[in-house]
Amino acid sequence: MNHHWELPDDLSASASARQRVRSALEIDGVREGTRDDAELIASELAANAVRYGAPPYTLALDVTADRIRITVSDHGSTADPRVTDAAHDAGNGRGLAMIAAVAEDLGWHREGDRLDVWADLSLVAPGD
């Protein structure tokens, strides 16, 4: 299943991304633990897009038999995303590190002024 949404042009984009992913994955029958990880990823990617990019912001959710890909796009970002090791008490800077910890894969690419940041979750249980 493929889902695609525009996100708000403010920090409510994070909550909107969580809600949309939760609803879509419930309908798609994805188990709760994986839905929780997907919500975290969508929320963090949306927050980063609003913080560092420019509108329009979009969220895409692509679900296949063996994986979920969550992609958030923005326009106008000038720096490439990077996973950092932020201090424990830092107010921000841990989002991509959290995503990298739960995702099977994390990446990004540019097309013109659009930056797409994506993360994959496996739907295949280890040993299957």
Image: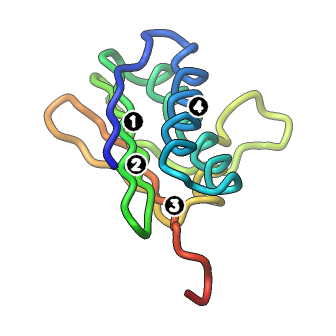
> Mark 4 highlights which residue?
18
User: Which kind of residue does numbered mark 1 sit on?
Assistant: Val
- The residue at 55%/26% (across/down) is 47
Dot 3 or dot 4, earlier in sequence = 4
4 or 1: mark nearer the eye: 4
User: Which kind of residue does numbered mark 3 sit on?
Assistant: Leu
Residue 124 horizontal/vertical position (percent): 53, 74
Q: Hey, which residue is sitting farthest left in the picture?
A: 112
Mark 3 and 1 residues: CB-CB less than 8 Å, in contact?
no
> Mark 2 highlights which residue?
118
Q: Hey, which residue is sitting farthest bottom in the picture?
A: 127
User: Which kind of residue does numbered mark 2 sit on?
Assistant: Trp
User: Which kind of residue does numbered mark 4 sit on?
Assistant: Arg
Residue 94 horizontal/vertical position (percent): 67, 42
Dot 3 or dot 1, earlier in sequence = 1
Residue 121 numbered tag: 3
Left or right relative to 11: residue 74: left
